[in-house]
Image (cartoon, rainbow, N blue to C red):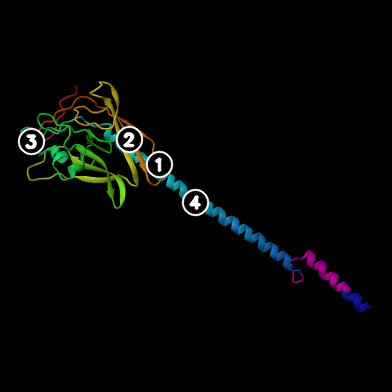
Amino acid sequence: MRKVQGSGFKVQGRRRIAHHFPGSRYAMGFTLIEVLIAMTLLSIMVVLLFSSLRTCAQSWEQGENKITEVNEVAVVHNFFQRHLSSAIPLWNDFNTGGAAAGRTGAGAVAGNNASAANQPGADTGTDDMNRTFAFQGKKASLQFVSVFPASAGRSGMQLFSITQDKQDGEQVIKVTITPFFPVTEGKEWHKEEVVLLRYVSAFTLAYFGIDEETGKSRWQDEWLKKNVQPQLVKIDINTANGVFWPEMIIELKVTGAAIATNTANGAPAVKGLD
């Protein structure tokens, strides 16, 4: 009996030690149910953590895509606002000796080059001296003269030709830039082609100005065979990637009659505005 009592006393003593000193060798371990519950809670926490990380990554990617889209719209808008708004009404009259001797100035780019077939200035808007007005607008193409700043790589007056073209199997808006001044005999202009926007599904232009038939200002699909520039140009762009493009309306700063160019010193000179 004493031995049994002694054994019970030892067991109770061990429990007291385990209670007061859980880190000792007498501490009791976790049960199987407790381990399973802990593993289940840990699994749930890991799943929630990875779900949160995935949501954060998707949000980050969507934010970057949105920033790219906004930047793309801003770049295109700034291009038209900077160059189209400052378009200059000029004649391509670098040749004063008529069409046979002439078309060697910038007008040749708009009329006689192989690439000029796609330019809106071809076979349109000529006067008695076979001059072509620099600003020529169609429903899906546009041509005008603007000036690059002196800090640019190619400064001075430039002939801009904007068209919708196909490149690498996709529709793009392409800008062709050609110097707008006489070229030395035997030389050629250094043209530069730049893709302004990709994934284009529709590119539509409209021009606001006086209609010669009615004498009233209205929106027109084409601006050809005129010697003045429109007051406004409306640009509608739709893309295949679903990005929303707001309608752009660019106001031209100069809308007076055409300015003749002077080739005596080899460069166009602005004589004045009407």
Q: Nearer the viewer, mark 4 or mark 2?
A: 2
Residue located beneath label 4 in the image: 58
Q: Quadrant of the N terminus?
A: bottom right
Q: CA distance from mark 4 to mark 2?
A: 33 Å
Q: Nearer the viewer, mark 2 or mark 1?
A: 2
Disc 3 marks which amino acid?
Ala
Examine the structure image and report whether residue 232 is included in the region drawn in magenta. Answer: no
Residue located beneath label 1 in the image: 70
Q: CA distance from mark 2 to mark 3?
A: 34 Å
CB atoms at circles 2 and 1 under 8 Å apart? no
Residue 235 tag number: 2
- Residue at x 82%, y 66% (from the top left corner): 16
Residue located beneath label 3 in the image: 99
In the rendered image, residue 65, in percent from the top left (x then y), is placed at 43, 47
Disc 2 marks which amino acid?
Ile
In the rendered image, residue 129, in percent from the top left (x then y), is placed at 9, 30
The extreme top residue here reads 215
The extreme front residue here reads 213
Of labels 2 and 3, earlier in sequence is: 3
Q: Which secondary structure is most common in the magenta stretch?
A: helix
Note whether 6 is above or below 176 in the view shown.
below
Residues 64 and 245: in front is: 245
Q: What is the secondary structure assignment of the residue under circle 4?
A: helix
Of labels 1 and 4, earlier in sequence is: 4
- Residue at x 13%, y 41% (from the top left corner): 112
Q: CA distance from mark 3 to mark 1?
A: 46 Å
Disc 1 marks which amino acid?
Val
Q: What is the secondary structure assignment of the residue under circle 2?
A: strand
Q: Which residues are magenta?
A: 8-26
Of labels 4 and 2, earlier in sequence is: 4
